Amino acid sequence: GQQLNQSPQSMFIQEGEDVSMNCTSSSIFNTWLWYKQDPGEGPVLLIALYKAGELTSNGRLTAQFGITRKDSFLNISASIPSDVGIYFCAGRYYGGSQGNLIFGKGTKLSVKP
Amino acid sequence: GAGVSQSPSNKVTEKGKDVELRCDPISGHTALYWYRQSLGQGLEFLIYFQGNSAPDKSGLPSDRFSAERTGGSVSTLTIQRTQQEDSAVYLCASSLGTSGVAKNIQYFGAGTRLSVL
């Protein structure tokens, strides 16, 4: 089935650093979503992207829908401790089921020891 | 309700027993989705409902898994004869619809953590 490759798998952040993560697919996607999941909670939507090239910000978060429609990235600027958690990309590919979101395996953000 | 509500939040069961997991979607949301999340993994799609019908149940792992939705609202995911590999967090989400910009944004519940001993 369709898969999303999300990287990096994990990263350590120091307060104030910028963070970047991305997702790539083998198929053309018509929707890209970025979610954050805290321990014991369900994923919470951060940003939704619907058009190739679209660049959308939500506070310190910025995400882009890649021009090729096969990738997306999420940037977090000036990270703070509460940014810690697992970030998932998700999307729908052309021809896919309307109800079927494909998820990446997540990027786990932790605080540098 | 204000958000997607799932119950129970935790369920411990013995191998071979049946379990029922419940999801109460956001009021007015016509679409409802079930996912499974194993430790350290992404979300695995199981099934979704548009109203009371399930256009896509391709993610159900075996015939031990079934789901129903009645009255266009509450849904129940049933796992029969549970196995240890069924242990995971089962997440439910709902959306206003399944097509159109913003209508298909999925909002998630906190999940049910199932442990099969």
Image (tube, coloured by chain):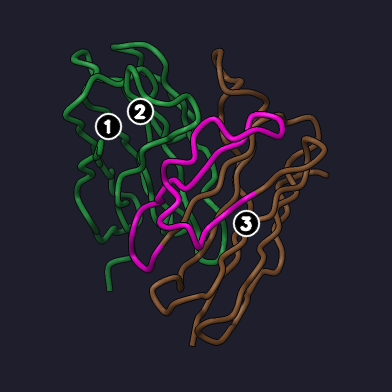
Q: What's the distance in space between the residues labelled 1 and 2, CA to CA?
A: 5 Å
Residue found at x 36% / y 17%: A30
Nearer to the camera, B101 or B19 = B19
The disc labelled 1 sits on which kind of residue?
Phe
Quarter occupied by the N terminus of chain B: top right
Secondary structure, mark 2, is strand
Total marks in image: 3
Residue found at x 35% / y 13%: A54
- Colour chosen for chain A: green
> Mark 1: few, some, or many residues within 10 Å (few <14, many ≥20)?
many
Residue designated by label 2: A63
> Mark 3: few, some, or many residues within 10 Å (few <14, many ≥20)?
many
Q: Which residues are magenta?
A: B38-67
Mark carried by residue A73 = 1
Q: Could you say which chain is coloured brown in the image?
A: B
User: Residue A53's spot in the image, x, y percent?
Assistant: 29, 12
Secondary structure, mark 3, is strand
Q: Which quadrant of the figure has residue A95?
A: top left
| Residue furthest front as drawn | B63
Nearer to the camera, B40 or A83 = B40
